[in-house]
Amino acid sequence: MTMFAYIAVDSKGSSFKGTVEQPDRTSVINAITKQNLRPISIKEVTVKDAGSSIGNILGGNKVKADQLVMFTRQLAAMVGAGVPLLRALTALAEHITESPVLQKILRGVIQDVEGGSALGDALAKYPNAFNDIYVNMVRAGEAAGILDDILNRLALQQEKNTAMRKRIKSAMMYPMVLMVITTLAFFGLMIFIVPQIGKIIKDLGGADAKMPAITEFMLGVSGFMVSYWYIVAGGMAALIYGFFTYIRTPKGRYQFHFILLKTPIIKSLITKVAVGYFTRTFSALIEAGVSVLEALDVTSRAVGNAIFEQALVEAEAEVKVGKSLSSVIESKDIFPPIVPQMLLVGEETGQTASVLIKVADFYEEEVDRSIEGLGAIVEPIMIVIMGGMVGLVAASVMLPIAGLSQTIK
């Protein structure tokens, strides 16, 4: 494929500039003409990586959530104003200069749409940027002729999900910083401080001085860390690498999420986050006209927790044989009672989407409260851990000093 820069005008004389990938100038003219434009100038240009394949694009960086939200809102506004889809995509591809990855993706999408593909099918080729939820909602919007409305809903949902992720990351940042500081302080004390204190104590008490067991233990640990620091560092690196590698496997991910759901302090928060994702995503898909079975399939992959994912996959199988979704969800003990109750109300009134949106709003507010409560719990726990670590070192130092004082007396 060759990259061409073009200038074209519409029936009103308005000028448009853009770039397009086509095999030759004739194909460029045909593509521009399909957009109800008349080409004025077409020039071949050289752009680095202009001909990237889908595989290369997928291997690149992901599109940032904020950029995707802005693109979705702008496309919704242009489509809602009556701008032809190809012209809207071309204009956006030209002006999204702050996201080269999204620009490359849009060029590929434009090429597919020019070739006759539906927008949803074209977006489906780039799962790193447009997930299953996005693609299925766009397909539903195209089928129903309400693409602009669906895109606005998508943008709103993305903003809600991004805001929740940011709140969770913000809440986890403080405990992580405290944990890092605690670990660094422990290694600093054991490598630099304890050996010096041990040397002073041995100088005062003599080589045959008998020290308390806790002091001997701390000096032994400190000596090992100083002498075999490369083993300690390598072991910790291997442990961390092995842990993250294992939880990326299906079995490891499931076991890790199972343990998290059994952890008293964070169980409630994880449940509320998963239920919030499920209800908002499922309601958006249902409201867009996606079938219940397909919505369950897509939502199960977007909920972010392996335990909830398996529960939704099982629910899909049970709904397929004729059971109501509310009764199936009620049989899964991981969902709070309010979820099947509200689903039942939605099924009886035919307003499942609007009912679940209220549930999603409720649980997103609950997530905020849980995050605040989690911070209030984690902070004293980390302070106790740091205090215990310092107290252990202090005891290992003060006990032999007290013993030496008694010997001198």
Image (cartoon, rainbow, N blue to C red):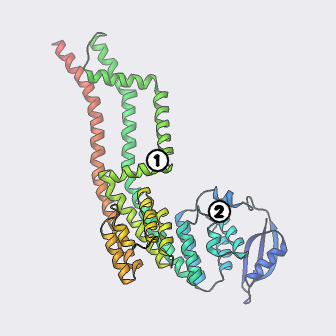
The quadrant of the rendering that contains the N terminus is bottom right
Q: Earlier in the sequence, mark 2 or mark 1?
A: 2
Q: Is residue 10 above or below residue 244?
A: below
Up/down of 23 relative to 196, above or below:
below
When asked about the image quadrant of residue 106, the answer is bottom right
Label 1 neighbour load within 10 Å: few <14, some 14-19, many 20+: some
What residue does disc 2 label?
100
Contact between labelled residues 1 and 2, with CB atoms less than 8 Å apart: no
Q: What type is the residue that disc 2 sits on? A: Pro
Residue located at (60% from left, 82% from top): 79
Name the foreground residue: 243 vs 322. 322
Q: On the rendered image, what quadrant is the C terminus found in?
A: top left
**Type of amino acid at the residue the image marks with label 1:** Gly
Q: In this view, does 329 lie to the left or right of 212?
A: right
Residue 252, numbered circle:
1
Q: Is residue 163 visible?
A: yes
Tell me the element at label 1.
helix
Q: Position of residue 192 (x, y in %)?
A: 39, 27
Instruction: Please name the residue shown 36% across and 74% down the image.
Output: 343
Q: Which residue shows up at 34% across the image and 18% down it?
A: 199
Numbered circle sitting on residue 272: none
Q: Nearer the viewer, residue 388 or 290?
A: 290
> In 3D space, how far apart are the residues under numbered discs 2 and 1 (Cα atoms)?
35 Å
